[in-house]
Image: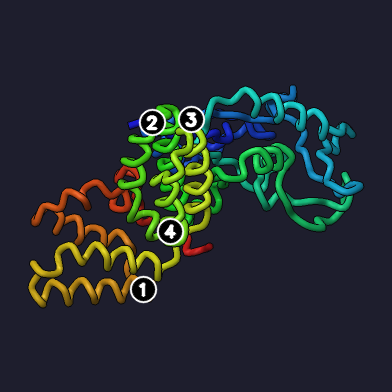
Amino acid sequence: MIKPRIVVSQCLGLERCRYDGSIIPEPIVAALQKYVELIPICPEVKIGLGIPRPPLRLVRGEGRPRLLQPATGRDLTKAMEEFAISFLDALPPVDGFLLKNRSPSCGIRDAKIYAGAEKAPAVGAGPGIFAQMVLARFPDLPIEDEGRLTNRALREHFFTRVFASARLRAVLASADLGALVDFHTQHKFLLMAYNQARLRELGRIVANLQRRPAKEVLAQYALGFRAALARPPRRPAVVNALMHALGYFSDRLTPAEKGYFLDLLNAYREGRQPLSTLVGVLRAWMLRFGEPYLDKQLFFSPFPEELVSLSDSAKS
């Protein structure tokens, strides 16, 4: 299986490169290292700042925030933007970004913006300068910070997108429409759980009734697939996918077994059971009855099982 490539802030458990010379222990990065190819980066070090270094801050400016270093009076906005362009231009195909939250360079939405360089209040929040360039360059890739990934649903959504992106990248590299058909088949239940309208649209693209060139079909499919997974799935759509899977066994289950599953389904709908509980029951029945079509469905294992964790901040 092709490994996803993830660009990650280097201070997240990889190197002591924060402004104060520290490192942030990050269990998510530690867990991912076995399964993904990490591309570590510290933009502040890469623009020539030392370790340790006087801290940076975003300061409200004309039309957009500036990246300033109050202790030295330096405006590092242009240097950071130029580095971001050169770094992103040189990247191989990647499947996602995991960046440091609240950072004036890497924060994707919550870096504080101040009214002035020194002794001024925060007046808002937004992306850091490096993160801003990432968001503009890769609008269809999963881009998250480690703070949001303490929420189990968001973390599993991120993992799902990253590993799906890597599988899609392999299909695109093959330029093979047969491989695209297999990919779409394996992701049908996942797409059903995420976006049924996109599932139908992608089915039409794969059918390729107009006999368009493979390169064109693959490019259109990739855009639609990434858009389908852009937002976390809603419970009603997931319930629909689970019910479709149940239909493969319904005539072979006892009334008690069906009732048990439907009770679990209702508990999931109400937020009292995790999705993994219902998937576990379905996977047991897949082993018991043998369902080759369901065995192929990546809805049941969209990323390595070892990355599943029950820890949850309960914050969205």
Looking at the image, is mark 2 or mark 4 earlier in the sequence? Answer: 2
Q: Residue at x 37, y 64 (%)?
A: 238
Residue 10 in view of the camera: yes
Between the residue at mark 4 and the residue at mark 1, the CA separation in whole angstroms equals 15 Å
What is the number of the mark on residue 54?
A: none
What is the number of the mark on residue 269?
A: 1
Looking at the image, is mark 3 or mark 1 earlier in the sequence? Answer: 3
Between the residue at mark 2 and the residue at mark 1, the CA separation in whole angstroms equals 39 Å
The residue that mark 4 highlights is 194
SS class, disc 2? loop
What is the number of the mark on residue 176?
A: 2
Number of the front mark, 2 or 4: 2
The residue that mark 3 highlights is 38
Q: Quadrant of the N terminus?
A: top left
Classify mark 2: residues with Cα within 10 Å, few (<14), some (14-19) or many (20+). Answer: few
- What's the amino acid at mark 3? Leu
Q: Decide: marks 3, 1 in contact (CB < 8 A)?
A: no
